Amino acid sequence: MKKILWSFGAALALAACGHNSGSSEAPSEDAVASGSVAALIAFGEAQIARADADAIEPRELAGIVPPVSDVDEPAVI
């Protein structure tokens, strides 16, 4: 019986180690790139400037939502 309790306690402790409250989590790269036109351009430049850019698989861009507006003037680049 003690062995079962110790095993259960160890499993419970290991499961608790991976818990993250999310309060101190930094925004994702996609969220930062979606924040402003300047951030989107900086993201694109950083992807091009990567040393391994020609050797890695293409990056998924579905999480990036370009900051657009129907009423604002076009951004100056």
Image (spheres, helix red, strand yellow):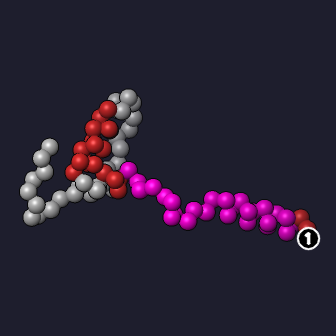
Q: Nearer the viewer, residue 58 or 42?
A: 42
Q: Name the quadrant of the C terminus.
A: top left
Q: What element carries label 1?
A: loop
The count of marks equals 1
Indicate whether 18 appears above or below 51: below
Residue 3 percent location from the top left of the image = 89, 64
Does the magenta-highlighted stretch encompass residue 27? Answer: yes
Does the magenta-highlighted stretch encompass residue 63? Answer: no
Residue 58 percent location from the top left of the image = 34, 40
With 69 as the anchor, is 23 left or right in this view? right
Q: Name the quadrant of the N terminus.
A: bottom right
Residue 64 appears in view: yes
**Residue at the (15%, 62%) spot, across then down:** 69
What residue would you read off at disc 1? 1
Give the magenta range: 4-29
Residue closest to the far right: 1
Q: Nearer the viewer, residue 37 or 57?
A: 37
Residue 33 percent location from the top left of the image = 30, 51
